[in-house]
């Protein structure tokens, strides 16, 4: 049985139409060093038992986040996801349904998106939110390009506390749109530098809080300075649980808020899929990217939900759309919503307080260790230490002692000259025994 | 009043041209929900993108029927986009342009020519 419907003649005809001599010619932009000659070295077949045994042996070589004291954060956080969340998202109505373009048969999906948007708006303190973007980093990039459209200015200032991956993603997309992206020098606490960098050409300033070094900032002064200059303040958060304890970005004067929603309802997932949160002032709504779900009434006056303001999106507006995204991170947004619903406001506040408490316990445990200097002045659940040895080496040494001690900043930004900086996160999953193990191991490694 | 093949109309008063979309266009579009009007002060060449009109089913570009500078834009459409359907060739105007070339207006179709054009569609 043929698995591929195209015949060699079909292919030859198509190649002729586009003027290519062969299919290989279509891949010339892939660097030769990245191309592979021939098949991957795998057996042509193997029994199920053998495959299971071999893959299990490979997997056993990993030390997973749940199997050792774990203090890695830097943009993705290990939180407890209740079994009820996993159980509910695996209902086939949720798991297998696709894009809700036809509201008549997608009211369940659309209602979830509406609830999700409502939760995101409430958490961020903003007027409107969309149905999610791919992740926090692309949401950050989208917000900068939106600021360009709204202000008709070309300059974006990225603060020194913005996660380097968010910087890179934003630079890639914004520079392709012709923007002048200014990335300020890495700084534990760079509020004044951001204010000083605002000028009459600035479309937006992008400030992360808690920032990549864990520092919590009241961005009200930056908001005032930005708005006085006609620029937008974009606030970025990579740890969504922090909304349960800190003043919301909306209350502090943000124009756009973007965040990584992974911390609520979603596991680490090897880096993805994650869920980008996006919220903004209502007056900017027509320039917002992404899918929007709205509440309305049908012809008989019954409440219903639909996708709305679709003319912003590329399947209608093409090159004049506000973004090329025409999807959302539906399942992850669903998990976020379910977990948020189970927590409620009270539960989220307690969860956030617990996270902060663990981080304070970590700080207490690390204070006084020779060769370890705590730098973060105000933190939520992540803090930065300067070590007397390169952080990457220290992390390796800690791992050999069975402790996953954090993320070296050099891993995020290899050329920043901050090789002695280690980012340490502590969520509600961290125990007193974990903290004791970190203290012991770090003391030994730094001795 | 003069007309373009893209269904825009022009009403000239001195050197100020009021422009909008015709009844035919408004009917084709369906209920208008939003109009992106041009910025006052913007300089347009004939054929440039001038505005965007959004209905429930489509978003259409509206082109400048004449060259000139936008001296006024119909901000009332912000709260009442349905005016475009109710009075497309009256209160549903989009912008007023100080024209730079009167001959452009004379070259456009008059009512009779436009009616004939519509009949041919």
Image: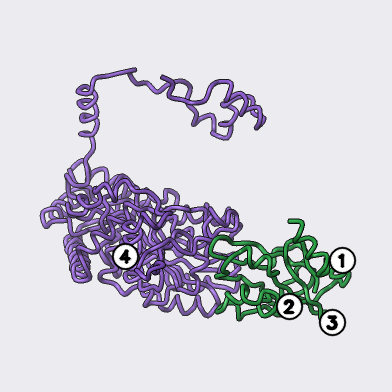
Q: Which of A211 and A329 is in front in this view?
A: A329
- Mark drawn on residue A127: none
- Same chain for mark 3 and mark 1? The answer is yes
Rendered hue of chain B is: green
Rendered hue of chain A is: purple
**Disc 1/disc 2 C-alpha distance (Å):** 19 Å
**Disc 4/disc 2 C-alpha distance (Å):** 43 Å
From the image, state whether disc 1 or disc 2 is nearer to you.
1
Check disc 2 and report the residue beneath it.
B96
Quadrant the N terminus of chain A occupies: top left
**Side of B69 where A284 appears, left or right:** left
From the image, state whether disc 1 or disc 4 is nearer to you.
1
- Mark drawn on residue B107: 1
Q: Is mark 2 on a helix, strand or loop?
A: strand
Residue A242, image x, y percentages: 28, 66
Check disc 3 and report the residue beneath it.
B14
Check if mark 2's residue and mark 3's residue have beta carbons within 8 Å. no
Callout 4: chain: A
Q: Is mark 3 on a helix, strand or loop?
A: loop
Q: Nearer the viewer, residue A125 or A315?
A: A315
**Disc 3/disc 4 C-alpha distance (Å):** 55 Å
- Mark drawn on residue A115: 4
Q: In this view, does B121 lie above or below A52?
A: below
**Disc 1/disc 4 C-alpha distance (Å):** 55 Å
Q: Tell me which residue sits at (18%, 47%) in the image.
A: A66
Residue A358, image x, y percentages: 18, 62
């Amino acid at each position: 049985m043929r698995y591929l419907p195209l015949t060699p003649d079909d292919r030859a005809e198509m190649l002729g139409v586009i003027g290519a001599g062969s299919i290989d010619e279509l891949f010339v932009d892939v660097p030769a060093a990245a191309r592979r000659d021939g098949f991957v070295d795998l057996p042509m077949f193997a029994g199920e038992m053998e495959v299971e045994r071999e893959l299990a042996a490979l997997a056993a070589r990993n030390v997973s986040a749940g199997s050792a004291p774990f203090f890695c954060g830097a943009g993705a956080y290990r939180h407890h996801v209740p079994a009820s969340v996993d159980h509910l998202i695996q209902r086939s109505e949720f798991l297998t349904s696709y894009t809700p373009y036809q509201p008549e048969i997608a009211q369940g999906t659309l209602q979830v998106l509406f609830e999700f948007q409502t939760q995101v708006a409430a958490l961020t303190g903003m007027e409107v939110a969309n149905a999610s973007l791919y992740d926090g980093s692309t949401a950050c990039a989208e917000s900068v390009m939106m600021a360009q459209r709204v202000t008709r200015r070309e300059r974006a200032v990225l603060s020194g506390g913005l996660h380097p991956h968010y910087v890179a993603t934003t630079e890639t997309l914004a520079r392709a749109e012709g923007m002048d992206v200014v990335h300020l020098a890495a700084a534990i606490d760079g509020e004044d530098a951001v204010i000083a960098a605002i000028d009459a050409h600035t479309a937006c300033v992008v400030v992360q809080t808690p920032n990549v070094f864990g520092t919590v900032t009241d961005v009200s002064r930056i908001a005032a300075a930005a708005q006085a200059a006609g620029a937008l303040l974009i606030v970025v958060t990579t740890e969504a649980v922090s909304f349960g304890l800190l003043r919301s970005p909306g209350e502090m004067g943000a124009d756009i808020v973007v965040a990584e929603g992974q911390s609520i309802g979603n596991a680490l997932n090897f880096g993805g899929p994650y869920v980008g949160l996006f919220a903004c002032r209502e007056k900017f709504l027509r320039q917002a990217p992404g899918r929007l779900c709205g509440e309305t009434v049908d012809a008989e006056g019954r409440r219903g939900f639909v996708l709305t303001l679709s003319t912003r999106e590329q399947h209608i507006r093409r090159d004049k759309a506000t973004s090329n995204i025409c999807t959302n991170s539906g399942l992850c947004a669903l998990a976020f919503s379910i977990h948020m619903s189970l927590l409620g406001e009270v539960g989220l506040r307690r969860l956030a307080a617990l996270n902060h408490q663990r981080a304070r316990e970590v700080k207490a445990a690390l204070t006084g260790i020779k060769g370890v200097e705590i730098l973060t002045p105000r933190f939520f659940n992540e803090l930065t230490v300067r070590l007397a040895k390169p952080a990457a080496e220290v992390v390796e040494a800690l791992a050999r002692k069975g402790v996953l001690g954090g993320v070296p900043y050099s891993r995020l930004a290899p050329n920043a000259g901050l090789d002695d900086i280690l980012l340490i996160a502590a969520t509600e999953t961290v125990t007193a025994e974990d903290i004791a193990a970190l203290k012991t191991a770090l003391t030994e490694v730094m001795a | 009043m003069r007309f373009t093949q893209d269904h825009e109309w022009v009403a000239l008063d001195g050197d100020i041209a009021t422009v909008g979309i015709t009844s035919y266009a408004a009917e084709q579009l369906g209920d208008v929900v939003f109009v992106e009007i041009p910025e006052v002060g913007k300089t347009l060449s004939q054929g440039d993108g001038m505005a965007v009109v959004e209905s429930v089913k489509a978003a259409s570009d509206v082109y400048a029927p004449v060259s000139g500078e936008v001296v006024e834009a119909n901000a009332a459409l912000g709260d009442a986009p349905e005016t475009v359907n109710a009075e497309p060739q009256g209160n549903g105007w989009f912008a007023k342009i100080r024209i730079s070339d009167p001959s452009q207006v004379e070259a456009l179709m008059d009512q009779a020519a436009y009616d004939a054009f519509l009949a041919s569609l």
